[in-house]
Image (cartoon, helix red, strand yellow):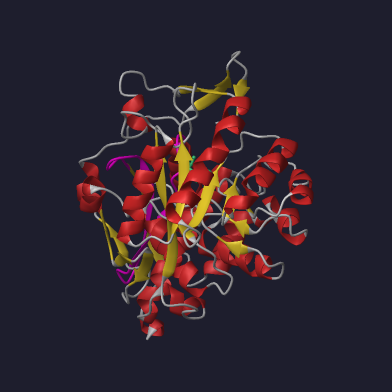
């Protein structure tokens, strides 16, 4: 069937829109009219990705055969000379995911079938419970458990600090925090205050919910390795599914120190772009979950490679799923999660909001905390360019963190 279709790429469109928040969407159109879409959003640096795609990537795609996903991936990776990097890899990711979408549509099959078929019924997720107090956080967790979630991430404000990661006070999101001043919001950090308050959150969670519910926590790279080792030990009695981003690991060796001291499972990877960023973490078995996202780590092709490598070392995938990842990314990761033999869990904060629902349509459904993938050919997600045009890009930044004396810290 595919032989009769002309899959020459004839148009590549880059659309930056803000249906609730900024997204960079790539649309690849072939001669026969079949199109595919990909997500290239890099939160806070959207226009850099858009211009890289428009100016440098799109011209190389025109006239290419959309079926040649691997060759196009290599052409954009090796062929660019400047390897890796968040902007470059998000652009490769968007192209890659759009091409998988096209291949699925041509084959008349959902993408997970092209990857090797289902390894499970549906994709288990973890949801976020946040709060200004432990009680507030646990109330929000209780509501999620009532909806059927079996795994919850807990984040609570640190007493004495204004604006802890994951907790937004009276603001809906970081966009709202910047409504009067579009510059990175600043938040204070104190490791001492955090270390003195965090254990109570998990102690009270286990007291209230028992042992069946899986719990995670995101440290957002605020600790040093030895502090993270201490935190891991401190939380051992509460049996976390994983402790996320305990330490930033440009130096992957850091994780050996944490691993030497604690049996709390470790997860990292949401800002990684390639397999090289996590190679030592995985092959030394210093982590348990690798959290690379299709949007930031070279698409389905990039994350599939990481997943296969990770499987050799008992490391499972737990892809990033924050609200700055578009429904296209959610769909791509749902297909991967359905297939990957070493899938662990998917982070999930909803498929979007009322506004983004007018722009993105998809056939994913959530039931009992699991994402079910429909049987539409390709990714099963689409993007309405006209609806998107009603929501123009709005400059916005992620926050930054400072210690109480003003020193810049990891946010
Ligand atoms: C998470 C993340 C996010 C990121 C955000 C950056 O685990 O969900 O840490 O909150 O900070 O997606 O763009
Ligand atoms: Mg995180």
Q: Which residues are magenta?
A: 17-45
Point 57% across, 68% down: residue: 70
Q: Quadrant of the C terminus?
A: top right
360 is higher (above) or lower (below) than 221: below
Q: Is residue 273 visible?
A: no
Image location of residue 365, percent across then percent down? 30, 66
Point 35% across, 70% down: residue: 372
- Left/right placement of residue 28 relative to residue 214 reads left
Task: State yes or no: residue 33 in magenta.
Answer: yes
Image location of residue 331, percent across then percent down? 39, 63
| Towards the viewer: 343 or 368 | 368
- Residue 144: which quarter of the image? bottom left
326 is higher (above) or lower (below) than 135: below
363 is higher (above) or lower (below) than 355: below
342 is higher (above) or lower (below) than 401: below
Image location of residue 204, percent across then percent down? 48, 44
Q: Quadrant of the N terminus?
A: bottom left
Image location of residue 65, percent across then percent down? 47, 69
Point 32% across, 35% down: residue: 393
| Towards the viewer: 261 or 114 | 261
- Residue 218: which quarter of the image? top right
């Amino acid at each position: 069937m595919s032989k009769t279709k002309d899959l020459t790429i004839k148009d590549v469109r880059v659309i930056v829109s803000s249906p609730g928040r900024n997204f960079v969407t790539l649309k690849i159109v072939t001669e026969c009219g079949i199109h595919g879409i990909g997500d290239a959003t890099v939160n806070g640096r959207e226009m850099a990705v858009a211009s890289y795609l428009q100016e440098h990537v799109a011209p190389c795609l025109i006239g290419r055969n959309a079926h040649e996903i691997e060759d196009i991936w290599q052409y954009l990776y090796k062929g660019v000379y400047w390897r890796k990097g968040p902007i470059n890899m998000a652009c490769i990711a968007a192209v890659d995911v759009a091409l998988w979408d096209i291949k699925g549509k041509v084959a008349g099959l959902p993408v997970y079938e092209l990857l090797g078929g289902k390894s499970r019924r549906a994709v288990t997720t973890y949801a976020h419970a946040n709060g200004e107090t432990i009680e507030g956080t646990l109330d929000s967790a209780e509501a999620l458990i009532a909806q059927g979630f079996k795994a919850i991430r807990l984040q609570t404000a640190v007493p004495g600090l204004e604006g802890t990661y994951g907790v937004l006070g009276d603001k809906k999101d970081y966009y709202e925090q910047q409504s009067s001043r579009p510059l990175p919001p600043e938040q204070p950090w104190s490791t001492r205050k955090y270390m003195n308050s965090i254990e109570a959150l998990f102690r009270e969670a286990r007291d209230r919910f028992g042992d069946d519910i899986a719990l995670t926590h995101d440290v957002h790279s605020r600790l040093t390795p030895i502090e993270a080792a201490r935190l891991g030990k401190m939380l051992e009695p509460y049996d976390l599914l994983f402790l996320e981003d305990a330490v930033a690991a440009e130096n992957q060796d850091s994780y050996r120190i944490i691993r030497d001291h604690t049996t709390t499972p470790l997860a990292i990877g949401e800002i990684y772009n390639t397999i090289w960023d996590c190679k030592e973490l995985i092959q030394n078995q210093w982590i348990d979950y690798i959290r690379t996202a299709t949007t930031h780590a070279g698409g389905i092709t990039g994350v599939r490679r990481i997943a296969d490598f990770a499987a050799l070392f008992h490391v499972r995938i737990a892809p990033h799923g924050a609200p700055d990842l578009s429904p296209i990314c959610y769909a791509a990761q749902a297909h991967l999660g359905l297939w990957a033999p070493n899938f662990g869990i998917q982070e999930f904060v909803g498929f979007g909001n009322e506004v983004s629902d007018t722009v993105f349509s998809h056939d994913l459904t959530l039931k009992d905390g699991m994402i079910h993938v429909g049987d539409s050919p390709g990714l099963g997600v689409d993007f309405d360019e006209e609806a998107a045009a009603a929501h123009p890009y709005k400059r916005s930044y992620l926050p930054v963190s400072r210690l109480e004396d003003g020193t810049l810290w990891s946010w």
